[in-house]
Image: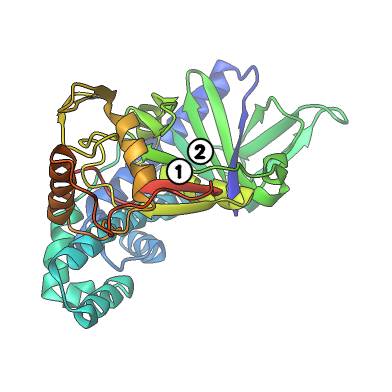
Amino acid sequence: MKVTRIACSASLNAGKHALLEEQARRLGRVRSKVWREYGSVSGAGVTDRTIRDRWMADGTAGGFGVLANAWKETVRDAAGDVRASRESAKVKVRRAVFRRTADPAERKRLCAALKAEEWAGVPYLSRLMRKHWRRGRSKVANQIVVRADNYRTFALAEGGDVWLAIPGLLPRETVKIPLNTTVAPSGTLRLILRGGKVEVRYQVDGSSLKSSARPPGARSIGVDKGYTEVVTDSDGVHHGPGLGILLSAESDWTKGLTAEALKSVPERRGSALVLVNAAYTSQADPRTGALGVRRGDRLYCPGGDVYQADHAAAINILQRASDPDITLFTPHTRVRQILRERADRQRARLPAPDSSPAARGGERNILTCSGASNE
């Protein structure tokens, strides 16, 4: 399990930053070209190596104005982002299959074709993929990806801060970057230029971190993935306000990052992640289940209560983890019907049927998260 670490440049002079900025700008054109030509269904099944071979054969690569290793790593990185966007579209397609296909055998066949990248030969899946996998584009022009064997690190004194030397625009030209750490980065590096500084991002084994040795918590918590912030939990705490906007400015594909973090961090701490159906979680009164009216980030409930919508969603997500009537793939129309029936029973003071959510038992070490966008 990998975890991203970040080191920053220290006192980088303007001349070096200008060289890095020009290299990132040229590589941004390469990244944009990958998305423009292969960032939709027409690029399905095309690997980064195929793209590289085509551009080398037809002379396209000669016009990039950067060293071969630099543009090839950018192609690999951009192709990975395109692949991530395709996998995200598959999640939506899979949900549609479960909503619209009642036959278990047919569901299995369609999902198998989707997983095996054979969806293009299945008209129904092909139509769904064209609907949910829209052509993407890239405006990222402030990043340089450097392969593990294409840079070196050194220190001017024993135990001193590390310097990073990466290739420049010309053969045998290097740009030496002073870092604010005594720990040398390793593996493939992602350099992000911002505000006159350079962030050096790299991955390390998560099990080696001190945080992995901390004991897990002792209770359940609901988590709603947001847009203005990373997540909101069922205690009403907003985590990472403004981070979503920042990430979107730095990466072509960031929707999967939060989901990956929600999966990997609990695993390192010995907790469990449970995905639940998110339909109407931001529109239902957490106390009664009755559907309210959402205006902006506020949820106005029939009984007069007003919730912050993401907080209400997180509470409802936590409750969905033990809801026997609403499973991960329950169609949103059925979810709405269930919520209305429960609200009607409450208003009529009728006893809940046996299938209604039972009281939660002893607290469990569990993190619950919505598995779909709120309806």
Disc 2 is placed on an element classified as: loop
Q: Quadrant of residue 84?
A: bottom left
Position of the N terminus, as image quadrant, is: bottom right
Badge 1 marks a residue whose secondary structure is: loop
Crowding at dot 2, Cα within 10 Å, few <14 / some 14-19 / many 20+, comes out as some
Q: Position of residue 207 (x, y in %)?
A: 69, 51
- Residue 327 appears at what percent x and percent y? 29, 59
Residue 147 in view of the camera: no
- Residue 164, placed above or below residue 306: below
Instruction: Give the residue displayed 67% in from the left and 35% down from the top.
Output: 164
Q: Which residue has dot 2 on it?
A: 169
Residue under label 1? 66
Tell whether label 2 touches label 1 (CB within 8 Å). yes
Distance CA(mark 1)–CA(mark 2): 5 Å
**Residue 316 or 340: which is nearer the viewer?**
340
- The one of 71 and 131 positioned closer to us in this rendering: 131
